Amino acid sequence: MTTSVFSEILEEVVQSLPGARGAIFVDWEGEAVDTCSTIGDTGIKLVGAYWGIVYRHLRASLKKLEAGSPIEVVMSFSRQLVVIRRVTDDYIVVFTLAEGSNLGRALGLMDWAAGKLRAEM
């Protein structure tokens, strides 16, 4: 199987953090550009599609409030953490982790990954 530079970046993020479930790089429509996942291809693509929709709605709402575009969104649930990081105006990366994972490390990895993904575009 051929890997892309994008999948290599996502794999480094996922393998660098215990509890990581997956990362997906998606375009403005929620379409997967590339993935790395421990929850399967379909599962991570659903994560990207659904959280992509949430991000688009949040972005539209914040534009109305003149708050600017969200750079990073962190959501904590009873069984998982979700981090969304803007790469460009048209692309985001979504990272899903088990609850109790090191959020500070996850945020640092997402910042690093966004920069690397942006540089490779």
Image: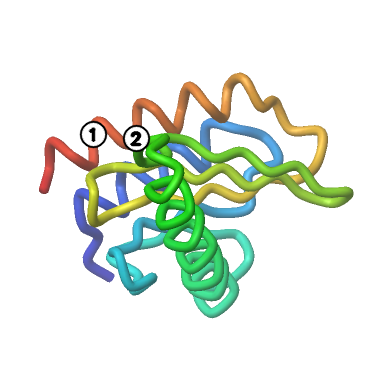
Q: Give 60 or 38, whichever is nearer the viewer.
A: 60
Tell me residue 75's x, y (percent): 68, 43
Estimate how packed mark 2 is, as few (under 14), some (14 to 19) or many (20 or more) residues with alpha carbons within 10 Å. many
Tell me residue 34's x, y (percent): 32, 63
Marks 1 & 2, CB-CB < 8 Å contact: yes
* Secondary structure state at the residue bearing disc 2: helix
Q: Which mark is residue 76?
A: none
Residue 87's image quarter? top left
Tell me residue 33's x, y (percent): 28, 65
Disc 2 marks which amino acid? Answer: Ala
Q: Which mark is residue 116?
A: 1
Q: Is residue 105 left or right of residue 118?
A: right
Estimate how packed mark 1 is, as few (under 14), some (14 to 19) or many (20 or more) residues with alpha carbons within 10 Å. some
Q: Residue at x 31, y 36 (%)?
A: 114
Q: Is residue 47 left or right of residue 121?
A: right
Q: Residue at x 76, y 49 (%)?
A: 80
Disc 1 marks which amino acid? Answer: Lys
Residue that extends furthest to the front in the rendered view of this protein: 65
Residue 85's image quarter? top left
Q: Residue at x 48, y 65 (%)?
A: 48
Relative to 91, say whether 50 is above or below.
Answer: below
Q: Residue at x 34, y 62 (%)?
A: 26
Q: CA distance from mark 1 to mark 2?
A: 5 Å
Tell me residue 72's x, y (percent): 47, 35
Relative to 83, say whether 59 is above or below.
Answer: below
Q: Would you name the residue on which mark 2 appears?
A: 113
Q: Is residue 14 left or right of residue 85?
A: right
* Secondary structure state at the residue bearing disc 1: helix
Residue that extends furthest to the right in the rendered view of this protein: 78
Residue that extends furthest to the bottom in the rendered view of this protein: 42
